[in-house]
Amino acid sequence: MSLNTQILIAAILGVLFGFILTVFPDTAFFSASLYGVSIASSVFIGLLKMILVPLIFTSIVVGVSNLQSGGQLSRTWKITLMCCVTTTTLALILGLTCAHLFGVGKGVDIVMFQDAMSQHQTPDTLTPSSFFTNFIQNTLINPFKAFSEGNVLAVVVFALFIGVALVAGGEKFTTVRKISHQLFEIMMLMIGWIMKIAPIGIFALLAKLVATEDVSVLSRLAEFAAVVTGTTIFHGLVVLPLLLWVFGKMNPLTFFKGTRSALITAFATSSSSATMPLSMKCAQENLGVRPQTVGFVIPLGTQLNMDGTALYEAAAALFIANLMGLDLTLGQQLVVCATAMIASLGAPGIPSAGMVTMIMVLQSVGLPAEAIAILLPIDRLLDTVRTVVNVQGDMMISVVVDRYTRKAELNSEAS
Ligand code: ASP
């Protein structure tokens, strides 16, 4: 049985087992099973986290240093950036439009959230300017500190510098380039080993998620959850495939077939960073994207390109405003869009990261940060779908970027 099929079966069995567990709460069977699935999911996630920083570093160094010829580096950069901004903007517009269309949060009795609101502790104020200051302070730091603390964004920046330096140095740094390549191949080999236990990890993660969510609280927010989930799925099933078809000239079915295992892993882990090894593998081996494009676009996209998160944050801000009985002006909605874009850039690819940066979006239009308490109970659930779309966007962009850079190279070779 292929790994894809094993992962799919494990996902279904995991959800079923989670539901079975909810039938026997407060029993020895429940706690023993929960302990078992917690251990299994920790091992799987731990292994992925272990490999994350060295993988990101080597893949970006290799990706950038491979972009040798003339304008290739700046071309790849530009196309990647353009794709990220376009897809995220579309996601933001879609999120706000659907939240408006379905009137999420309108006419809801805010009293029912008072409990959650009073229990919530207000996090530190996060304004856009302080966010930027934090962003710079946390990004331009000693690389060894960044490595040891797992500060992925700082590692990305340092890897970009090294990659560019390798390109600038040319022949002089052939040995370092070769070593980076080999280190990267070693990482890919280790990922192959880790993926062998992916079905067990995914079974455990989903069983734990279903068994521990508070279903009664979830039902309160069902409408909002349904709208956000539906809109995110629409973005993933209609908008992104359409862009892929038009600009990447790839049949969406081929794309989904080739990326299925990465998408399911994203769903189960709620972490684009944890899924990144698999996204790279799928893009390279199943979609035929060249290694230098994969090594550049996917690690960068994992950090910076999050359509699902942006869509969620914009819709959630409107939801909260509606709950409070506030009508956001068009200008305020534009502020929401701009901050949600920055917030999605700054959110690391880990579970519920969007929840943290959400505070900034709420505060940008004067909504209380406490309101995230309303969203917390459903966040883990919504995180699953938005992470799938985040990961899908990265792989899709790698296809588009690869097509355009390949074409440009052929043209420059011909002329
Ligand atoms: N979990 C998401 C991801 O890893 C980030 C988020 O919380 O929105 O892509």
Image (cartoon, grey):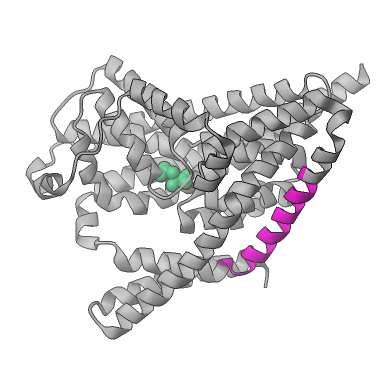
Viewport quadrant of the C terminus: top right
Q: Residue at x 37, y 63 (%)?
A: 209
Q: Quadrant of residue 130?
A: top left
Predominant SS of the magenta segment:
helix
Q: Residue at x 40, y 23 (%)?
A: 133
Asked whether residue 186 is drawn in magenta, I would say yes
The answer to whether residue 337 is visible is: no
Left-right relation of 207 to 291 = left
User: 354 or 47: nearer the eye?
Assistant: 47
Viewport quadrant of the N terminus: bottom right
Start and end of the magenta stretch? Answer: 180-198
| Residue furthest out toward the bottom | 28
| In this view, 171 is above or below 40 | above
Asked whether residue 294 is drawn in magenta, I would say no
- x and y percent of residue 10 in the render? 52, 70
- x and y percent of residue 292 in the render? 76, 38
Q: Quadrant of residue 325?
A: top left
Q: Quadrant of ligand 1?
A: top left
